[in-house]
Image (cartoon, rainbow, N blue to C red):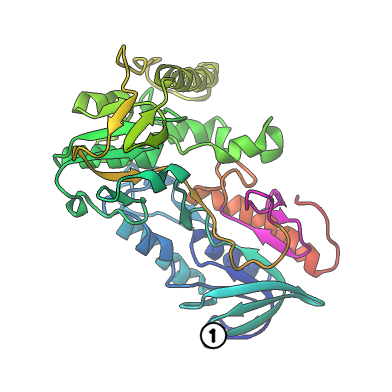
Amino acid sequence: MIDARQKNLRFAGTTDVVVIGAGHAGLATSYCLNERSIDHVVLERGEVANSWRNERWDSLKLLTPNWQSRLPGFAYDGEDPDGFMSMPEVIDFIQSYADFSAAPVVTNTSVTSVVQSDSGYRVATNRGEWRTKSVVIASGACNVAVTPKIAASIPADVNSLTPHQYRSPSQLEAGGALIVGASATGLQLADEIKRAGHAVTIAVGEHVRMPRTYRGRDIQFWLDQTGILNESYDQVDDVIRARGLPSPQLVGSAERKMLDLNSLSDSGVRLAGRLVGVNNDVAQFSGSLRNTCALADLKMNRLLDAIDDWAERGHARCDAVERFDATRNDESPMLNMNLADGSIRTIIWATGFRPDYSWLDVPVLDRKGRIRHDGGVVDALGMYVLGLPMLRRRKSSFLHGIEDDARDLTAHLHTHLLGRCGRAA
């Protein structure tokens, strides 16, 4: 195996595996490849943990507690296991892992094309071309912020931002803000911007309501211990839908507070239904807010029932059973909002993210631009993908969830290199 310090000086060449992306998924893959003495290189368009450095807002913290922060061969060892890492701490954690594992990372190297060849793949970059037998795509699930087509109908004098562009309330003009989307991102931004003194309205679509703590334990404890996070992609009824679910309404804070639509309402944030259109500068909202919230409440209570059942069988010592107030809604929810009267100065589109595969010149994308794969084994011989939601397990997209996926796919990749290909283990 080529020494990592030597490989860092190479900008092109031949190797067994090219890993694209030096975030936690790419670095975990590199660690597992090193364990098997598989020659490889990790290509990174910027610096290690690039998206954490450049595409997150200032106050963001991980949704998972520190005790859950681990990667292959490496884990959090600080003095606050129940706390939540800030962005600088996440960056330091991932950079420390890169140093610890001596990952062969080539930074500031953008992949411009991946094409198939007789011997595997040719990976073109801004610094030369790599020839490889196998490619692991670990470039992330949130490269591009998704905005609906109706964003083009917003009045020109209303500032329009994505979460990638937002950093803090200080960049917003004085006046009201409309947050579109009520997953973790939407709720956190609505809460922060409201506390900064802006009038805030949040447009609520499908969402996953979840308490920060339950029966005296962090919700992640329950999801981990009950085995919910380990549920396999081939055990769910509709894996496509499961992979597209919004992130749960959680926030990492020292107080371990519950952030939901009720807490936003209590702080003065106004709730509206899903944004369905803009006509003559008037935003139009769905009238289904009550039903949308009722469904989220129902699913949360089903989760809590499952936790109760597991706990009552003696698996964990914990506090008494809890239930939470139903999501409150106005009797007559807002259906329209004038965007031209100056009351709304900023709209933030917390409407999701998608990967960027614009450089992937291999026919493995479906009609929606999603990469076709079976548990991370891409529909092209010798190609793999990591770091996507519900890739192989419910925990796949979490920091701590990457290890099992990386080990599974590295084992499959090793078999491929030995000439015995098959389905993922």
- Residue ID at (56%, 40%): 244
Q: Is residue 20 above or below residue 303?
A: below
Q: Kindly identify the residue that appears in the image at 60 percent across and 56 percent down.
A: 386
Q: Position of residue 360 (x, y in %)?
A: 64, 66
User: Circle 1 sits in a helix, a strand or a loop, which is it?
Assistant: loop
Left or right of residue 357, residue 200 in this image: left
Label 1 amino acid? Arg
Please rate how many residues cluster around mark 1, counting C-alpha atoms within 10 Å: few if below 14, some from 14 to 19, many from 20. Answer: some
330 over 217 or under it: above or below: above
Horizontal and vertical percent position of residue 223: 50, 33
Most distant residue in the right direction:
420
In magenta stretch: residue 231: no
Q: Residue at x 50, y 72 (%)?
A: 44
Q: Quadrant of residue 138?
A: bottom right
**Residue 111 appears anywhere in the view:** yes
Does 110 sit left or right of 277 as displayed?
A: right
Name the residue that disc number 1 marks.
127
The magenta segment is: 365-387
The residue nearer to you, when weighing 51 against 352, is: 352
